[in-house]
Image: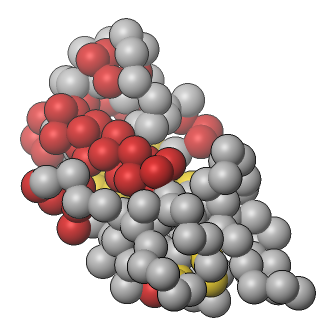
């Protein structure tokens, strides 16, 4: 196997870690699709498992804006916990989880460290397909999930 991936797996195993999570500094982004990162890393999970490690990815959900009417719409006078946050009940939120689940199914990665959304980030948008007519919380902590896409992706955020 070529590239920088086996040495971190070796180092993690040597010091007794049980998992390896690829994040910003690794240059790896599980949310993208195309000829880049996914196919080139298919050998990584079996290599890591051979060292006794589970391998996963990190995804930053909150503290950013995705625009297009897909961010949380807070009640008047309130702002999201970290300034901005996409709503998981929006069309963007459903597509976000589809991409993450597709990546994990195709790559063999078994972990997802998911950063956000946060309790208290209420969304009152009536335009998001994952909402009822009343205000709901955006994300897993609020018990709302994006529209079901079938399989695990539809259950991911509950």
**Rendered position, 27 above or below 49:** above
The residue depicted at 19 percent of the width and 24 percent of the height is 43
Q: Is residue 49 left or right of residue 99?
A: left
Residue 66: image location, x then y, percent: 67, 47
Residue 101: image location, x then y, percent: 26, 47
Quadrant housing the N terminus: top left
For residue 57, say whether it is visible: no
> Closest to the observer: 128 or 31?
128
The residue depicted at 40 percent of the width and 45 percent of the height is 95
Residue 86: image location, x then y, percent: 61, 60
Q: Is residue 115 left or right of residue 31?
A: right
Residue 91: image location, x then y, percent: 46, 51
For residue 33, say whether it is visible: yes
**Rendered position, 147 above or below 99:** below
Q: Is residue 121 left or right of residue 14?
A: right
> Closest to the observer: 82 or 16?
82
- Quarter occupied by residue 41: top left
> Closest to the observer: 125 or 56?
125
The residue depicted at 30 percent of the width and 77 percent of the height is 158
- Quarter occupied by residue 148: bottom left
Snapshot colouring: secondary structure
Q: How many marks?
A: 0
The residue depicted at 46 percent of the width and 29 percent of the height is 32
Q: Is residue 51 left or right of residue 74?
A: left
């Amino acid at each position: 196997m070529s590239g920088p991936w086996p040495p971190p797996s070796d180092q993690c195993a040597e010091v007794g870690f049980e998992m390896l999570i690829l994040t910003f500094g690794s240059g790896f982004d599980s949310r993208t699709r195309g000829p880049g990162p996914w196919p080139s890393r298919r050998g990584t999970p079996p290599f890591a498992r051979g060292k006794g490690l589970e391998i996963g990815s990190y995804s930053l959900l909150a503290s950013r804006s995705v625009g297009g009417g897909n961010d949380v719409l807070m009640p008047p006078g309130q702002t999201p916990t970290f300034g901005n946050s996409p709503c998981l009940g929006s069309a963007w939120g459903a597509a976000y989880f589809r991409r993450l689940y597709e990546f994990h199914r195709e790559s063999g990665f078994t972990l997802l460290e998911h950063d956000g959304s946060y309790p208290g980030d209420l969304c009152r948008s009536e335009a998001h397909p994952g909402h009822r007519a009343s205000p709901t919380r955006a994300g897993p902590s609020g018990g709302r999930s994006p529209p079901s896409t079938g399989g695990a992706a539809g259950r991911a955020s509950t």
